[in-house]
Amino acid sequence: MKRKGRLLILCKTYPSPSAKHAETSCVAGMDEAGNLIRLYP
């Protein structure tokens, strides 16, 4: 699902090895309405 908008990044996990990608890390943020959003690579 693609969404456009402003997002305040709150935290990022330490990169970990992945079978599909070299490394993955999860990113979490908050949109302008105060909703928490998780982002994946």
Image (spheres, helix red, strand yellow):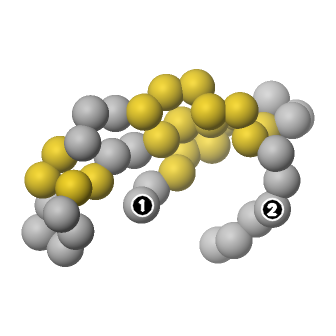
Q: Dot 1: what SS?
A: loop
23 relative to 7 in the view: left or right: left
- Residue 20 appears at what percent x and percent y? 19, 73
**Residue beneath disc 1:** 41
Determine the secondary structure under disc 2. Answer: loop
Front residue of 30 and 23: 23
Q: Which residue lies at the image location 52% right of the left edge and 51% below the top edge?
A: 39
Sequence order check: which comes first, mark 2 or mark 1? 2
Q: Are marks 2 and 1 in contact (CB under 8 Å)?
A: no
Q: Which mark is residue 4?
A: 2
Q: Amino acid at mark 1?
A: Pro
Task: Examine the rendering and report whether any part of residue 35 can be seen.
Answer: no
In this view, 29 is above or below 26: above
Residue 6 is labelled as: none
From this view, report whether residue 21 is shown above or below residue 31: below
Residue at figure coordinates x 42%, y 33% from the top left: 12
Q: What is the C-alpha distance between the residues marked 2 and 1?
A: 16 Å
16 vs 35, left or right, is left
Under mark 2, the amino acid is: Lys
Which percent across, then down, holds residue 22? 18, 63
- The residue carrying pointer 1 sits among few (fewer than 14), some (14 to 19) or many (20 or more) residues within 10 Å by Cα, namely few
Query: Can residue 34 be seen at all in this image of the molecule?
Result: yes
- Based on the displayed image, in which of its 4 quarters is residue 32 positioned? top right
Left or right of 3 in this view: 12: left
- Quarter that holds the C terminus: bottom left
Residue 25 location in percent, x, y? 33, 46
Quarter in which the N terminus is drawn: bottom right
